[in-house]
Image (tube, grey):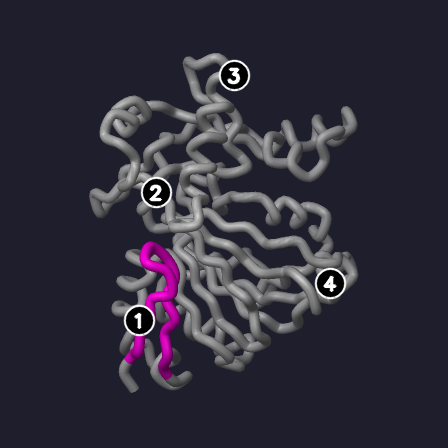
Amino acid sequence: MTLTVENINPRIGSEIKTDIDTLLGGTEAGHIRSILEQRGVVFFRGLEISDDQQVAIAKTLGNLVETEGEGGIYKISLDRDVNERAEYLKGSMFWHFDGSLQPYPNLAALLRAVRLSETGGETEFCNTYAAYDDLPAAEKGAIENLRVVHSAERSQYYVNPEMSHEEINFWQQYPTKSCPLVWTHQSGRKSLLLGATADYVEGMAVEESRALLARLRDWATQPEYVYRHDWQVGDLLIWSNTGTMHRAMPYPLDSGRLMHRTILAGEEPLA
């Protein structure tokens, strides 16, 4: 079966309709990756697959992060009985991309809805390629060579603005990383590199640099660059981690919401 593709928003998000056998066979994997790179997010509505099938589909698209979860499946839940890192996952409710502190940020992730909250819990994505493309030329020139220090500590202030001294010491154990504000990809395309781990711009006053980062985040998350996915049980969604930011919308923490995630390993360095 071939793919039927419907673009949801002009700048981001596409629904792909096909059958499970086509996805498992990998015959359309190159096509799906091409759509993903251009559109940022693709999803398959109500696919109703198993964990093993999710991992098998992921392997047709790239190499898995083997340390992620059990058998390639990581359980995303704010229930501590399900996920011991539930408290840390509260940071997922703020705009971010995964792996800013890694040499090779994750290429993409596959997310499947297993159990949903009765209210909230949608996931939003923004296209950071399109947001960069639409910046005025003068602004592109002004930010082209800027570098931003990213840190795990910075991201935790979104979750807990009054961290204890012990908590700050814990997060400061993780090294910071200097990243380009404008990521020039191996393809030649450029995207904005922002998110909750972005702390300050090198060589710029902290106040000025944080104002700049907030302004660019607001630009990149305007409605024309954003797709909000309203989940249905069985949905399989794939997002390009290197060309988008994402966040989960609020939902009751005791709702039992459960998502299964599989991560594709990064293929280009963040230099």
- How far is the residue under mark 3 from the one under mark 4? 39 Å
Quick one: quadrant of the N terminus?
bottom left
Q: Amino acid at mark 2?
A: Ala
Q: Position of residue 116 (x, y in %)?
A: 66, 69
Residue linked to disc 3: 206
Magenta segment: does it hold 71?
Answer: no
- How far is the residue under mark 2 from the one under mark 1? 26 Å
Q: Earlier in the sequence, mark 3 or mark 4?
A: 4
Q: Residue at x 46, y 36 (%)?
A: 217
Residue linked to disc 4: 82
Label drawn at residue 131: 2
Q: Secondary structure at mark 3?
A: helix
- Against 29, residue 128 (above or below) is above
Q: Position of residue 146 (x, y in %)?
A: 35, 23
Number of numbered discs present? 4
- How far is the residue under mark 1 from the one under mark 3? 44 Å
Residue linked to disc 1: 29
Front residue of this view, candidates 123 and 173: 123
Q: Secondary structure at mark 2?
A: helix
The answer to whether residue 71 of the structure is visible from this angle is yes
Quick one: quadrant of the C terminus?
top left
Q: Position of residue 76 (x, y in %)?
A: 63, 60
